[in-house]
Image (cartoon, helix red, strand yellow):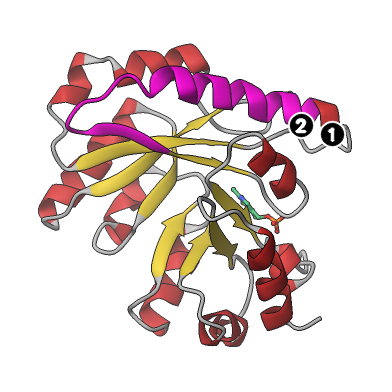
Amino acid sequence: MSIRENLHSIKSTLPAHVTLIAVTKTQPLDKLMEVYDAGHRIFGENKVQELVEKQEALPKDIEWHLIGHLQTNKVKYIAAFISLVHSVDSLKLLQEINKQAEKNNRIINCLLQIYIADEDTKFGLSFSEAEELINSEELIVLKSIKITGFMGMASNTGQKEQIANEFRSLKRFYDKSRSFSAFNVELNNLSMGMSSDYPLAIENGSTLVRVGSSIFGERSNLRS
Ligand SMILES: *Cc1c(COP(=O)(O)O)cnc(C)c1O
C-alpha cells in the first residue's frame, strides 16, 4: 500500500478522541510531503537536529512533536516552534524548557514521560517521581510551560498481556492524577502506542498514538 493508503486506513480505525502523530524519523522530506499532501499535519521526531532540519524545510502549518529524549542544551533549538514535548523526564529539563519558552514569548506544552516498561533501556520517571514533580514547589514558578499529560512506552515484547498491563498501569496513574490541577498542570493527554501496539494502547485509554513504520514502511537502520 502507498503511504497515503496506510495513513487513511489507520485514521479510519481511530476513535474520535484519539490523535495520530505521524512519526517521521529517518524518513526523507519527499515522504513527509506525501503525508502532508494527504492532509496530515501532526508530525513527530525523536532527534532535535533532524526535527529542526525538517521544520525549516517544510510548510509552516505542520505541528511538530518531540517524542525522543531531550537534552537541556538542545531545548533552545526547538523552543520557537515545538507544539508538544512528549519526553520530559526531569525538573531540570522542565526549568530549561520554561526559560526558553519565556524567551520566545510562548507557553510550551509538555508530557511527563513515565517509565512503564520492564526494560532498563527506556527513559522516564517512576509514578512516585512524577507525582512529586507535579506537586513540587519548584513547579509553581514555571509560568511558560504547561504539563498536559503523560507519555509511556511499553516493553518491546510479543506478550500482549504484559503490554496491556503496562498501558493499564499508566492509565490508572493518569486517572488518579487528573484531579490535580494548577494553572500549569492540566492533564488531558495520554501518549501511548506505536505501530506494534497502538490498538492495544487505545483500548487502554491512549489519546495520542505515535505511529511510524505502519505509515512509512519499515525504517532502514542506517540513520536510526
Ligand atoms: C520511533 C518511535 C515511535 C514510532 O515507532 P514505529 O514502530 O515506527 O511506529 C513511537 N514513539 C517513539 C518514542 C519513537 O521513538
Let me know if residue 197 is in the magenta part: no
Q: Which residues are magenta?
A: 162-188
Rendered residue at 24%/62% (across/down): 80
Is 142 or 4 nearer to us in this picture? 4
Q: Residue at x 26, y 43 (%)?
A: 97
Is 188 in front, or is 220?
188
Residue 120 in view, yes or no: no
The answer to which quarter of the image holds residue 180 is top left
Residue 163's label in the rendered image is 2
Residue at horizontal 41 percent and vertical 44 percent from the top: 71
Vertical position of residue 22 compared to residue 143: above or below? below
Please, what is the three-letter code of the amino acid marked with disc 2? Ile
Q: Look at 20% across and 26% down and name the residue there.
A: 182
Q: Residues within 10 Å of mark 2 (few under 14, many from 20)?
A: many
Q: Position of residue 124 (x, y in %)?
A: 53, 29
Does the residue at mark 2 contact the one at mark 1 (Cβ under 8 Å)? Answer: yes
Residue 153 location in percent, x, y? 64, 37
SS at mark 2 in the image:
helix
Relative placement, left or right, of 85 versus 127 is left
The residue beneath circle 1 is 160
In the rendered image, residue 175, in percent from the top left (x then y), is placed at 47, 23
Horizontally, residue 204 falls left or right of residue 151, namely: right
Q: Which mark is residue 220?
A: none
| Residue 12, image quadrant | bottom right
Q: Is residue 142 above or below residue 70?
A: above
Instruction: Give the amino acid type for the residue marked by disc 1 in the picture.
Output: Lys
